[in-house]
């Protein structure tokens, strides 16, 4: 794999050291806090543009544009999947935040063991008046072991749900899941740091964007200080 260091966004050593000392929960809190900051900035901008609006109208408009932040959507998805007893792992950008550098993200990535008997209740959990979720897309993803989306149009957030494959790697990464606490109110099953890195490398090798490489580097910053278990990673790399 040919890398291009000058094009990779790398943080300075002081910031890396600060983030190494933080727990996954603390890094997630920083990342999710960016959504709260966005709400405050939007409210201030709307108040400046529309001085005639009262507090009630300002609140309604902010809610309309940012009714879901990543933290709220993740909580809703986790609650739904656990209630429906769907095995899942949080991976992708949100997992990268837990192990590496916090940042604003507009999507949530999950790997999930979804079967046909989950479909009706899953559609009920994400009603069409608030979400876009296609029954046909779910069935196709299950059949071909690919992915489907849960989209919240008002906020622009989406959840990419990748159907768990019957492969040695997918079976083993579910066994390595870590329970983390995105907020004080609940826990969620996250892919391990080493598995997040493996998938980022795979996406990049398949022609993915520089974002996957940046996320991998950010994740590594968090992992190095916690002694990434290379003996666990190496067999998985061969099987991915």
Image (cartoon, grey):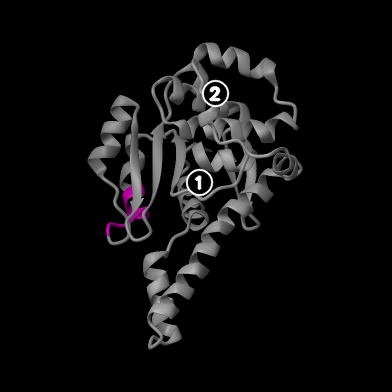
Mark yes or no: residue 145 visible.
yes
Determine the residue located farthest toward the left in the rendered image.
136
Up/down of 220 relative to 14, above or below: above
| Secondary structure of the residue carrying numbered label 1 | helix
Q: State which quadrant residue 18 falls in.
A: top right
Q: Is disc 1 surrounded by few (<14), some (14 to 19) or many (20+) residues within 10 Å?
A: few
Determine the residue located farthest toward the front in the rendered image.
6
Task: Using residue 46 as the reference point, say whether residue 22 is left or right of it.
Answer: right
Rendering coords of residue 232 (x, y %): 65, 18
Up/down of 144 relative to 118, above or below: above
Q: Nearer the viewer, residue 46 or 6?
A: 6
Task: Using residue 34 as the reference point, say whether residue 119 is left or right of it.
Answer: left
Q: Which mark is in front, 1 or 2?
A: 2
Reading the image, the residue beneath label 1 is 82
- At x 51%, y 13%, the residue is 239
Picture disc at residue 198: 2
Task: Using residue 145 as the reference point, say whether residue 32 is left or right of it.
Answer: right
Q: Nearer the viewer, residue 67 or 2?
A: 2
Q: State which quadrant residue 21 falls in.
A: top right
Q: Nearer the viewer, residue 206 or 131?
A: 206
* Measured Cα–Cα span from mark 1 to mark 2: 26 Å
Up/down of 77 relative to 185, above or below: above
Rendering coords of residue 47 (x, y %): 44, 80
Rendering coords of residue 75 (x, y %): 51, 54
Rendering coords of residue 111 (x, y %): 46, 34
- At x 55%, y 63%, the residue is 37
The residue stretch that appears in magenta: 122-128
Mark yes or no: residue 177 visible.
no
């Amino acid at each position: 794999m040919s890398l291009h260091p000058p094009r990779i966004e790398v943080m300075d050593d002081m910031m890396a050291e600060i983030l190494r000392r933080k727990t996954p929960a603390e890094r997630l809190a920083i990342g999710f806090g960016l959504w709260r900051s966005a709400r405050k900035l939007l409210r201030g901008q709307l108040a400046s543009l529309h001085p005639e609006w009262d507090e009630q109208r300002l609140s309604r408009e902010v809610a309309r544009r940012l009714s879901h932040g990543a933290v709220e959507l993740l909580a809703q998805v986790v609650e739904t999947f656990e209630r429906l007893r769907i095995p899942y792992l949080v991976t992708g950008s949100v997992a990268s935040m837990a192990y590496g550098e916090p940042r604003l993200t507009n999507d949530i990535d999950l790997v999930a063991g979804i079967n046909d008997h989950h479909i009706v209740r899953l559609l009920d959990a994400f009603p069409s008046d608030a979400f876009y979720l296609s029954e046909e897309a779910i069935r196709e993803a299950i059949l071909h072991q690919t992915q489907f989306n849960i989209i919240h149009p008002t906020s622009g957030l989406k959840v990419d749900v990748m159907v768990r494959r019957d492969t040695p790697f997918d079976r083993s990464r579910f066994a390595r899941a870590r329970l983390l606490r995105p907020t004080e109110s609940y826990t969620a099953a996250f892919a391990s740091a080493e598995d997040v890195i493996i998938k980022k490398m795979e996406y990049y090798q398949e022609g993915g964007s520089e974002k996957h490489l940046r996320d991998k580097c950010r994740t590594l910053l968090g992992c190095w200080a916690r002694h990434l278990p290379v003996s666990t990673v190496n067999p998985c790399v061969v099987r991915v």
